[in-house]
Amino acid sequence: MKIDKYIIRWQYSGNLLTGTIFTYCYLIDGSAVHCGHSQCNANDNFCRATGRKLSLARVLKNANLPKEERTKVWDAYRNMTAKKRW
C-alpha cells in the first residue's frame, strides 16, 4: 500500500499447528523503516484483518507520525479493498 511518501507492507509468519502466528507491518519512509507486530494467541482463530489492524496501529505509534498523516494512512487502509473492514 502506498500513501504519499509512505509505503506499508505486511508479512505473516508462524506455525498454524501451534497457533503462534505473527503479523508484521513495515512502514517505509524514505530511508527509515518502522516495524509493528501482532501475535495470534494459540486459542484464537487467525484473522488477517485483525492482525493487520493491530500491527498497523502499533507501527503508526512507533513511527510518531503527526495526526494528519495517521489519518491519511487509516483512510487509505479502509479503502484498500472493496471488502468493508469496519
Image: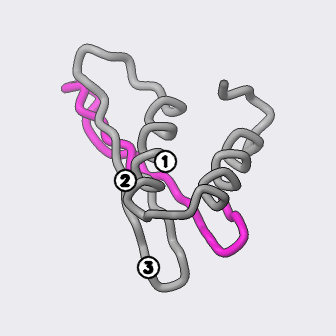
- Circle on res. 12: none
- 10 relative to 86 in the view: left or right: left
- 79 relative to 25 in the view: left or right: right
Q: Name the residue under label 1.
A: 56
Residue that sits furthest to the top in the current view? 43
Q: Is mark 3 on a helix, strand or loop?
A: strand
Give the camera-side residue of 27 and 72.
72
- 15 relative to 54 in the view: left or right: left
The magenta stretch spans which residues? 1-24
**Residue type at tag 2:** Gly
**Residue type at tag 3:** Ala
**Residue type at tag 1:** Leu
- Gap between marks 2 and 1, in whole Å? 7 Å
User: Is tag 1's residue or tag 3's residue first in the polypeptide sequence?
Assistant: 3
Whether residues under marks 2 and 1 lie with C-beta atoms below 8 angstroms apart, the answer is yes
Measuring 77% from the left and 42% from the top, which residue is drawn there? Answer: 79
Q: Is mark 1 on a helix, strand or loop?
A: helix
Whether residues under marks 2 and 3 lie with C-beta atoms below 8 angstroms apart, the answer is no
The relative height of residue 42 versus residue 51 in the rendered view (above or below) is above
User: Residue 32: x percent and y percent?
Assistant: 44, 79
User: Residue 55: x percent and y percent?
Assistant: 42, 45
- 40 relative to 86 in the view: left or right: left
Q: Name the residue under label 2.
A: 36
- Gap between marks 1 and 3, in whole Å? 16 Å
Q: What element carries label 2?
A: strand
Q: Name the residue under label 3.
A: 32
Q: In which quarter of the image is the C terminus?
A: top right
- Gap between marks 2 and 3, in whole Å? 14 Å
User: Residue 80: x percent and y percent?
Assistant: 73, 45
